[in-house]
Image (cartoon, coloured by chain):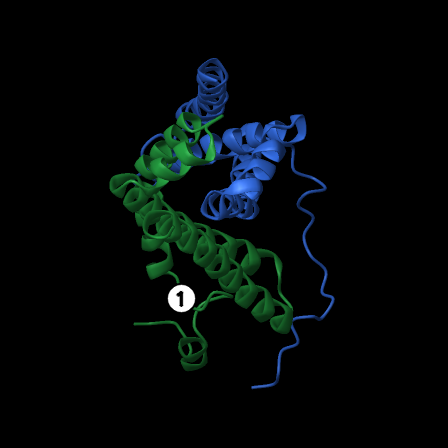
Chain colours: A green, B blue
Amino acid sequence: MSMRTPLSKVRGLGSAKEGTDHFWMQRLTGVANIPLMIFFVFLVVGMSGADHEAAASMIGSPIVAIVLLLMLVSGLYHMRLGMQTIIEDYVHAEGVKIACLMANTFFTVAVGAACVYAVLKISFGG
Amino acid sequence: MAEVDVKDNRPLSPHLQIYKPIFTMMMSIVHRITGAALYFGTVLVAWWLISVAVGGGYYTFAAIVFDSIFGRLILFGYTWALMHHMLGGVRHFIWDFGYALGPGDRDWISKATLAGSIGLTALIWLIGLLAI
């Protein structure tokens, strides 16, 4: 028999209100990040000292561009979840917490938009 | 039910003031710190990609900044943060399944994370500097 009060059920658990999905997605993106980040490190090291033409043709090639986009999506999703946990752990004033959580999403999406735009422009644009 | 004010200044148990720093505890804190550092460092990744997309003089400018001593220092730190957070993530994933949680194992796996991250960072930079 559940010991929870009706109010606790309505309010959700703790500061995050829900967590199973967060936990799973963090693991999923974390595992995906391992090969994707290894690829990213190889890419950056391989491109050190390259001139613009070499850099653009490397990033613009289909496989590199696609894997780079996957790296960005997975990495950004992972970091948004991670920062959310940090905010929920340390910010307790409700108004400030909501503002920080929104800022977290906005920052992640903004960085993502800039990176995805850049990769697509390099791939398709002039 | 009366409104509960969470900002009531109720007395709290001491924590940071009394706990002796233990290796696994420090590794947990560093895992969070490296995560936050990587988070803010993605701005550098975005800047680099945009510099390639824009091209020309802007790419040269970005390359000069990244190649500077300050730039290389930041990249070196970013590399270590990435390796440490990645290996730390693997450690947490192993822990998720219940392995390596015992008193000896958890210290060993934490030390291996740190040693691995330092080793990988050194390897990556060695290869990178030799390749140029």
Binning the other alpha carbons within 10 Å of mark 1 as few (below 14), some (14 to 19) or many (20 upward) gives few
Q: Is residue B89 above or below residue B10?
A: above
Viewer-proximal residue among B118 and A15: B118
> Is residue B99 among what the camera can see?
yes
Q: Residue at x 63, y 73 (%)?
A: A95
Q: Residue at x 45, y 26 (%)?
A: B113
Q: Chain of mark 1?
A: A
Query: Dividing the image into 4 quarters, which one contains the N terminus of chain B?
Result: bottom right
Give left or right: position of B42 versus B9: left
Q: Secondary structure at mark 1?
A: loop
Q: Residue at x 41, y 56 (%)?
A: A117
What is the residue that sits farthest to the left in this orientation? A63
Give x and y (percent) for residue B87: 41, 31
Give x and y (percent) for residue B95: 36, 37
Q: Which residue is mark 1?
A: A18
Give left or right: position of B122 versus A94: left
Q: Find residue B73 and report its image quarter.
A: top right
Give left or right: position of B12 versus A87: right
